[in-house]
Image (spheres, helix red, strand yellow):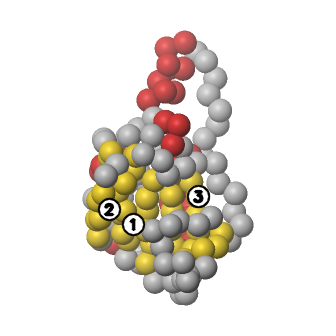
């Protein structure tokens, strides 16, 4: 995966080969990058995305060769907030696909305080929980 905003002399590589459903994870030099990857729903966050994001951050935080971690979104939004599309199943009795769940309380600020420096590279809209998740980061960069 190549991002034209990154130094072309730095090799971009898949981080550890883990397959994720809702995020993309890569490494550029000493920087870990987590990209929300649900651009068709403006990166709306569901339980699976949150759990995968936590899993990726845990791996980067445990890796001494990683110096910082960036979170950004693919497509035209950072995150449109919570994915409320599943709410319909509450009323209709429809079965939803099982989702991954994180091992700890959602959006625990102590979780981020213990990790590597975290940078939110906000590319477009950030609404609701998408905005709240930005506040976890040490540095926030925003662009349209």
Q: Secondary structure at mark 1?
A: helix
User: Between disc 2 and disc 3, whose residue precedes?
Assistant: 3
- Classify 65 as above or below 116: below
Residue furthest toward the top? 92
Seen at 49% across and 27% down, the residue is: 85
Q: Label 2 vs label 3: CA separation? A: 19 Å
Q: Position of residue 8 (x, y in %)?
A: 54, 78
Q: Around disc 2, counting alpha carbons within 10 Å, would you say few (fewer than 14), some (14 to 19), or many (20 or more)? A: some
State yes or no: discs 1 and 3 in contact (Cβ < 8 Å): no
Q: Label 1 vs label 3: CA separation? A: 21 Å
Seen at 40% across and 46% down, the residue is: 77
Q: Which mark is residue 24?
A: 3
Residue indicated by mark 2 = 136
Seen at 54% across and 20% down, the residue is: 89
Q: Label 1 vs label 2: CA separation? A: 9 Å
Q: Would you say residue 76 is visible in this rendering?
A: yes
User: Between disc 1 and disc 3, whose residue precedes?
Assistant: 3
Q: Nearer the viewer, residue 97 or 12?
A: 12
Q: Position of residue 144 (x, y in %)?
A: 31, 52
Q: Position of residue 82 (x, y in %)?
A: 41, 38
Q: Nearer the viewer, residue 3 or 109?
A: 3
Residue indicated by mark 1 = 111
User: Between disc 1 and disc 2, whose residue precedes?
Assistant: 1
């Amino acid at each position: 995966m190549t991002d034209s905003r990154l130094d072309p002399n730095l090799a971009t590589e898949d981080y550890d080969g883990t397959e994720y459903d809702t995020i993309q994870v890569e490494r550029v030099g000493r920087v870990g990058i987590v990209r929300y990857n649900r651009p068709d729903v403006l990166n709306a966050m569901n339980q699976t995305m949150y759990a995968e994001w936590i899993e990726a951050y845990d791996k980067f935080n445990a890796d001494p060769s990683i110096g910082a971690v960036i979170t950004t979104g693919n497509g035209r939004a950072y995150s449109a907030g919570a994915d409320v599309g599943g709410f319909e199943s509450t009323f209709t009795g429809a079965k939803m696909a099982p989702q991954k769940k994180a091992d700890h309380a959602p959006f625990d600020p102590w979780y981020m305080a213990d990790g590597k420096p975290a940078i939110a590279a906000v590319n477009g809209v950030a609404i609701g929980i998408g905005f709240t998740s930005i506040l976890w980061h040490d540095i926030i960069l925003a662009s349209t």
